[in-house]
Image (tube, rainbow, N blue to C red):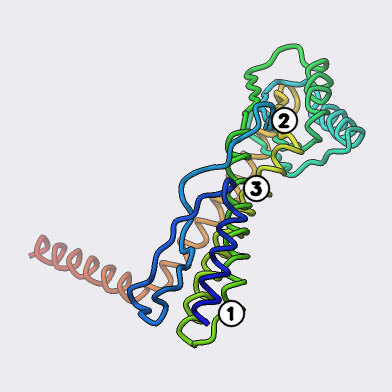
């Protein structure tokens, strides 16, 4: 059996020559596998890359600006995103004493990112801040693809060896390596899926706010004043409730005070 496994491995090496260089070792903990070379790890070499590749670009940006009406701005952005086949992944509204602020995280197809940015920019007189990035992840993308390909080839070779293995020790050792490779493959494929999502859909974070002036500001002031009075009254009532739990101590203190006052008057009378 060992002879057949060694022969199979030799054939695999010949067919894989020139694609991926593999390092071989014999586990010291499995002496029965002497003469059977198992491909336990990959070398650090990466297959040659083509000189011309499709660039993988991640587009993202952050903009912030003031608006005269947050509702109109929200309607414009929502309509534009819908027309561009995108979606709003996060929508937050914050109310402050002097302004209302909306914050949106928008995902649109990469080829529609510039259209989205231009449409929003046409309604803005001045940006408080504006940052647009185009991140080139081509090198990482190619490395991930190469790692996945190499690990899957190595996993296939282990699978072939597993079919020829006859001893329990051999089977357990090979299955362990296959499981380890599968975990690594899933991890790299997860990163690849994340990059594909970021490449396919660009992200724009939009923060816009409306200043609150005049009657709206006064209404907010009186509303907060009313809330303050109500909260203060409730606090006073809870203070009374707290004192009611201390009535014995309060009664004792009053008794001591009155007793001292009576003694003082008695002494002055004498």
Per the image, label 1 sits on a secondary structure element best described as: helix
Instruction: Check the image and report above or below for 172 versus 39.
Output: below
Q: Position of residue 184 (x, y in %)?
A: 55, 59
Q: What residue is pinned by disc 1? A: 164
Q: Position of residue 98 (x, y in %)?
A: 65, 27
Distance between the Cα atoms at labels 1 and 3?
Answer: 33 Å
Disc 3 or disc 2, which is closer to the eye? 2
Per the image, label 2 sits on a secondary structure element best described as: loop
Q: What residue is pinned by disc 2? A: 54
Of label 2 and label 1, which has the lower sequence position? 2
For image coordinates 59% across by 65% down, the residue present is 157
Along the viewing direction, whichever of 209 and 154 lies nearer the viewer: 154
Q: What residue is pinned by disc 3? A: 192
Name the side, left or right, on which 86 lies relative to 65. Answer: right
Of label 1 and label 3, which has the lower sequence position? 1
Disc 1 or disc 3, which is closer to the eye? 1
Q: Position of residue 104 (x, y in %)?
A: 73, 36
Of label 3 and label 2, which has the lower sequence position? 2
């Amino acid at each position: 059996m060992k002879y057949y496994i060694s022969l199979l491995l030799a054939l695999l090496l010949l067919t894989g020559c020139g694609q991926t260089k593999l390092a071989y070792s014999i586990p010291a903990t499995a002496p029965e596998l002497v003469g059977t070379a198992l491909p336990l790890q990959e070398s650090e070499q990466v297959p040659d890359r083509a000189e011309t590749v499709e660039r993988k670009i991640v587009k993202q940006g952050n903009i912030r600006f003031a608006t005269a009406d947050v509702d109109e701005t929200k309607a414009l952005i929502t309509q534009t995103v819908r027309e561009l086949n995108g979606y709003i992944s996060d929508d937050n509204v914050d109310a402050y004493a002097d302004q209302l602020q909306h914050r949106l995280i928008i995902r649109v197809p990469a080829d529609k990112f510039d259209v989205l940015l231009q449409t929003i920019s046409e309604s803005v007189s001045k940006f408080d801040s504006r940052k647009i990035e185009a991140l080139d992840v081509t090198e990482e993308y190619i490395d991930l693809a190469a790692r996945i390909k190499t690990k899957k080839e190595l996993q296939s070779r282990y699978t072939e060896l597993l079919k020829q293995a006859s001893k329990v020790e051999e089977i357990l050792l090979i299955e362990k390596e296959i499981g380890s490779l599968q975990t690594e493959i899933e991890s790299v494929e997860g990163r690849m899926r994340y990059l594909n999502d970021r490449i396919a859909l660009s992200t724009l974070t939009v923060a816009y706010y409306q200043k609150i002036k005049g009657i709206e500001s006064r209404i907010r002031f009186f509303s907060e004043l009313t809330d303050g009075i109500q909260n203060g009254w409730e606090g006073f009532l809870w203070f009374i409730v707290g004192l009611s739990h201390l009535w014995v101590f309060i009664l004792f203190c009053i008794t001591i005070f009155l007793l001292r006052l009576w003694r003082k008057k008695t002494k002055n009378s004498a």
